[in-house]
Amino acid sequence: MGSTAAQPEGSVDVQRQFRTALSMFATGVAVITAPRQEGHPIGITVASFNSVSLDPPLILFSVDRRSMSLADLCSAPSYAVNVLEETQQEMSNRFAKANGDKWSWRNGGASERDAAVLLPDALATFECEPYAQHDGGDHVIFVGRVTRHRARPHGRPLIFFGGRYRSLDAVQSASA
């Protein structure tokens, strides 16, 4: 097993090595969306989504404290987790950017000031109400209570591993 030499915990080299080690855990990719009081809804790409509890139904994700959307997300009345399908890499990239028009692909429509914003063709969606927020160092950990969810029975997830997008080689049946 590899190791690193003793270096100060906050050094750039240690942080880079830690990030590289973390990238060895394959994750799905999701976009968190939420209404905003003024302007376009919030939309940010995350790879830090997972389940917490079945009863009550809870999920969590984390957001970097440097995110321009953090303050709005902290006060949002609801949010949605949109699990992306492997064909949605462009959508992941669009919402991963700090600036730019993330919503230009959408047609106008009804106000979404109080409603969850669901992305088209997501593999699964989880509409949530805020349950808790926790300090996570340079991130804020959001715990959401799932109020509604849906999943497509067929599809393949967008995977992130080793610092880049990947694809599943093959989907095996449950009986294999």
Image: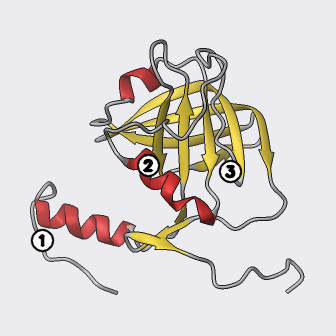
For marks 2 and 1, give the CA distance: 38 Å
Give the x, y percent position of residue 125. 70, 43
For marks 3 and 2, give the CA distance: 15 Å
Which disc, if any, is residue 41?
none
Q: Which residue is mark 3?
A: 122
Quadrant of the image containing the N terminus? bottom left
In percent of the image, x 62 and y 35: which residue is there?
Answer: 80
Looking at the image, residue 65 lies above or below residue 72: below
- What kind of element bears circle 1? loop
Which disc, if any, is residue 94?
2
Nearer the observer: mark 2 or 1; the answer is 2
Counting residues from the start of the chain, the first of labels 2 and 1 encountered is: 1
Mark 1 Cα shell of 10 Å, populated few (<14), some (14-19), many (≥20): few
- What kind of element bears circle 2? helix
In percent of the image, x 61 and y 23: which residue is there?
Answer: 78
Three-letter code for the amino acid on which mark 1 is drawn: Ala
Three-letter code for the amino acid on which mark 3 is drawn: Ala
Mark 2 Cα shell of 10 Å, populated few (<14), some (14-19), many (≥20): some
Q: Is residue 69 left or right of residue 148?
A: left
Q: Is residue 61 left or right of residue 1?
A: right
Q: Which residue is mark 1?
A: 6
In percent of the image, x 45 and y 13: which residue is there?
Answer: 38
Looking at the image, residue 94 lies above or below residue 148: below
Visible residue check, residue 78 = yes
Give the x, y percent position of residue 134. 44, 32
Three-letter code for the amino acid on which mark 2 is drawn: Arg
Counting residues from the start of the chain, the first of labels 3 and 2 encountered is: 2
